[in-house]
Image: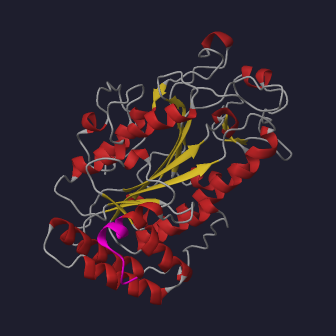
Amino acid sequence: MSKLTRRGFLGALGAATLPAWFPRLAFAAPGRAASRHDTLICIFLRGGADGVNVVVPFGDRHYHDNRPTIGIPEPGAGEGRAIDLDGFFGFHPSLAPLKEVWDDGGLAVVHAAGMPINNHSHFDSMDWMERGTPGERRVLSGWIGRHLAAVDPANTSPFRAIGFGDFVPASLRGTIPATALASIADFHLQGFEDQLARFQGTLAGLYSGTTFLDVQALQTFGALDRLAAVDPTQYPPANGAQYPDSDFGNALKQVGQLIKADLGLEVACVDLGGWDMHDTESDQLPGLLADLGAGLHAFYADLHDRRANLTVVTMTEFGRRIEENASGGTDHGTASFMFLMGGGINGKKVYGAWPTLATEALADPGDLAVTTDYRTVLSEVLERRLGNPGVDGVFPGFVRGNYLGICKNA
């Protein structure tokens, strides 16, 4: 360890990774006053979630016509039926835990949401959605990165935006510096406190000067000391919350612990993959939705006393084709759904114009049409919950319509 060079250290940080479940985080600078605005938890459902089997439009007579085998039965007696929300839409039965959050007024749905581009490429759609610039690749930063820079441009803390896991999401790219802490944090998480102390001591010796890089590194070490006090093995969730024993559950539990530690967490990005179900959807979807529903329910219960300053948003790169395929799955589509959860949400409602599933109303070649641009939803969250009045800079070139009224003013 004593032979580690500055260049070698930077290379090591770039190569090392944390467990895939670990969330991506952004922190406020140490010593800054606590914001009255929300912490944003952005959950990306990667693979293209089938919105009409997640939030089921059982009141649309065309739904079951297109899904004779994988369609979710309408609400009623017996197991496996949709959970009624408003007489037209219902949750997939595996999302039963979220009905409690819905009834508490802490959860809303936006249906038929997505990008106004009919693109069935996972790579392109995820990239455009995270940049916040559908169809435009010349903007290199991500929408969260631009937001963070806009609300606090003087904050140059290297610990404000952090990449944990295999990569830093494109949404976090921008002028706010991202610090890779994989090696150090991995030592801490695995319990090797003696190696961690030696590692940090060696790094402090490498960055003990007065250059810009030295100053930034010393700020990072201070932040690490604060994180070291947060022991993930000694965290009792509140209110009887039980996070699922899964990668997703572990990620949300870790985010909850960091929020309660009052470390200045501004943004956490968590991924949940596996939504690309071209076959046997009825076998795969229930388990994935059970993980999603249990995780969100536990997070809401655990942070219930802080829910007034939390906003959770889910998104997915696209939805699925309305007609089921011959393999009992669904192919790539266009519009899907978004969940919004928190105390600042006008919940217990499905937002957005429903385009219907009639053949003539579908987007080519048979997809649910987008009636709400996802950037309209995010703009409302940023302006009303996160205190950013300059959403035009976060989503350049986007001409939004009226807000849907999902968010209360902070």
In which quadrant of the rendered view does residue 217 lie?
bottom left
Whether residue 168 appears in magenta in the rendering, the answer is no
The percent position of residue 64, horizontal first and vertical second, equals: 78, 25
Towards the viewer: 239 or 298: 298
Towards the viewer: 55 or 276: 276
Magenta part of the chain:
1-10
Residue placed farthest to the left in the image? 210
Against 250, residue 410 (above or below) is above
Against 84, residue 38 (above or below) is below
* 230 sits to left or right of 394: right
* 404 sits to left or right of 351: left
In which quadrant of the rendered view does residue 135 lie?
top left
Residue placed farthest to the top in the image? 360
* 310 sits to left or right of 353: left
- Which image quarter is the N terminus in? bottom left
In which quadrant of the rendered view does residue 85 lie?
top right
Can residue 351 be seen here? The reply is no
Residue placed farthest to the front in the image? 3
Figure disc tally = 0
Q: Image point 18% across, 52% down: which residue?
A: 153
The figure's colour scheme reads secondary structure
* 163 sits to left or right of 33: right
The percent position of residue 347, horizontal first and vertical second, equals: 50, 46
Q: Image point 60% across, 70% down: which residue?
A: 241
The percent position of residue 337, horizontal first and vertical second, equals: 56, 36
Can residue 78 be seen here? The reply is yes
Q: Image point 51% across, 68% down: which residue?
A: 254
The percent position of residue 353, horizontal first and vertical second, equals: 52, 25
Whether residue 4 appears in magenta in the rendering, the answer is yes
Towards the viewer: 4 or 357: 4
Against 56, residue 342 (above or below) is below
